[in-house]
Every structure is written in structure tokens, then in C-alpha cells.
Image: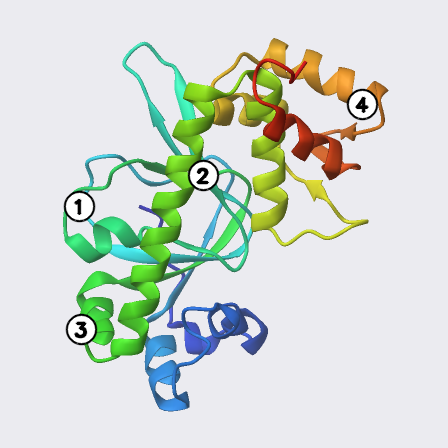
Amino acid sequence: MPQNDKGEARGFASSKLSVLRKHPYFADLEPAAFEQLCRYAKHATLKRGTPIFAKGDPPTSLFAVIEGTVKISISSPDGRNAILNLIGPGEIFGEIALLDGQERSADATANTSCELFTIDRREFVPFVRSQPTLAMKFIELLCARLRWTSDQVEQVILQDLPGRLASALLRLTERRKLTEGERTLAITQQEISEMVGMTRESINKQLRAWAARGLVRLEHGAIVVLKPEPLQALVEAGPEDGD
């Protein structure tokens, strides 16, 4: 668990607090309720690779990403890793254990240098109980998480490598709300391999084949989606035709 900077979030620039205000789950809060939420929020700055929480930890806080990316992952005893999600600016995480009071179900790590807001469970749970609309928003969030996980399981079971990879790239662009001309995903080939359950070498080979066809462009630490339509066609074609 990272140490919070001294002072509460109200001491920070309003541009950072706007991350909470712009979030769809907090946008409709009344001004007084939002101010109360901001009083609970504390600021933390983390270096890349800093553990935020580990699987099995007690749920102490909710987190909102201001800058950077947080990796949600699990690992096996033999050292294999699987990335379940990458949480970017404007997104929140840690809500599942926070709401049900059970142990953390995965590890969370600063994938890049990050700025976060943290809200203590002892303050946030009573706040949600006092805000029925916000409680419904969190039900929607949990449903979205479940759909995301179901999609990942479906791809691993039913899709071949091209379909898995294409689907992962498209889902990441959709979640980041990247539009034409700015579909740059700040993700490494190792990270994408851990998301789709294939080796980095296989991922590199497939991406290079797509790059030769002009579907993607490979940059240092990033993948640029140039033509999403052919990738979507691969997803829909299924394993038999998705070479």
C-alpha cells in the first residue's frame, strides 16, 4: 500500500479533482455531496512497479487514477502472470473487495508512474449508503467488470491468436474512447501477451504481419491501431478463417 501525500485532496489543483467530477459514477452528485467526497480523497504519487495491493489483502480503499496506468493481474506459483485489466486516467479500481468486504481478488501494481486518489473504505461505504443513485452506479460498474471478464474468458476458450489479439486491441481502444487518428495504445507486447494468454514471440509475429498489411503500427512501448475494421472482421470470422 503506497503512502499518501500529506493533506487531503482539497489541497490539490481543481484540475485533478475534476477526474472525480468527470467520472460517470460521480458526475451527477449534488455539489455538497461531491465536496464531501473530495474531503475523503487523499492524493498519492507512485513510481512504476510500486505494489498498491496484493491478492488476499484486506479491502482498505477505493482508488481513482489521475495520471498513469495501473495493472490488475494474477500470478501462478511457477511465476506465470496474467493481466486482467489495465486501468487508465479517469477510471477507478478496487471497488469489488471494497463493497463486499472480502479479500482482494487480484494484485494491483503501478504499471507506469502514477498519481492516484484513495478513499478509505470506512468513509466511502457510509457515503455510498447515503447516496442511492451512486449505489446504482456502482452496480452498473460491477456489471461492466463482469462483462469484461466474460469477454476475456470467451476469447481464451473460443478464439485463436489473431482473434484474441484483435479483440483485445479493439476493446482497449473502445475503453479508452480512442477515435480515428488517435488510436495509440500505451501497452507493450509483453503486456498484451499476458492479457491474451499467448507468448510474446507469437504476439510479435502476429503484430508484424498486421503491420506489413497496414492494420497497425508498432512503436516503442505502444501499438497504434490504424484500421480497426479488418481487425473486427477477424474477431467475427472465428478461428477457422482468422489467419
N-terminal label among 4 and 3? 3
Mark 2: which secondary structure? strand
Label 4 neighbourhood size at 10 Å, few (<14), some (14-19), many (20+)? some
The mark nearer the N terminus, 1 or 3, is 1
In-front residue for pair 210/72 = 210
Q: Earlier in the sequence, mark 4 or mark 1?
A: 1
**Of callouts 2 and 1, which one flags the residue occurring earlier in the amino acid sequence?**
1
Which colouring convention does the figure follow? Answer: rainbow
Give how far apart the Cα atoms at labels 4 and 3 are.
Answer: 51 Å
- The mark closer to the camera, 4 or 3, is 4
Disc 4 + disc 3, Cβ < 8 Å: no
Disc 3 marks which amino acid? Answer: Pro
x and y percentages locating residue 198 in the rendered image: 52, 15
With respect to residue 218, does 59 lie above or below?
below
Q: Residue at x 14, y 46 (%)?
A: 102
Residue 7 in picture, x, y percent from top left: 38, 71
Q: Which quadrant of the structure image shows residue 107?
A: top left
Please name the residue that numbered disc 1 is placed on: 58
- Left or right: residue 54 compared with residue 43: left
Q: Residue tagged by mark 2?
A: 85
Comparing labels 2 and 3, the label whose residue is closer to the camera = 2
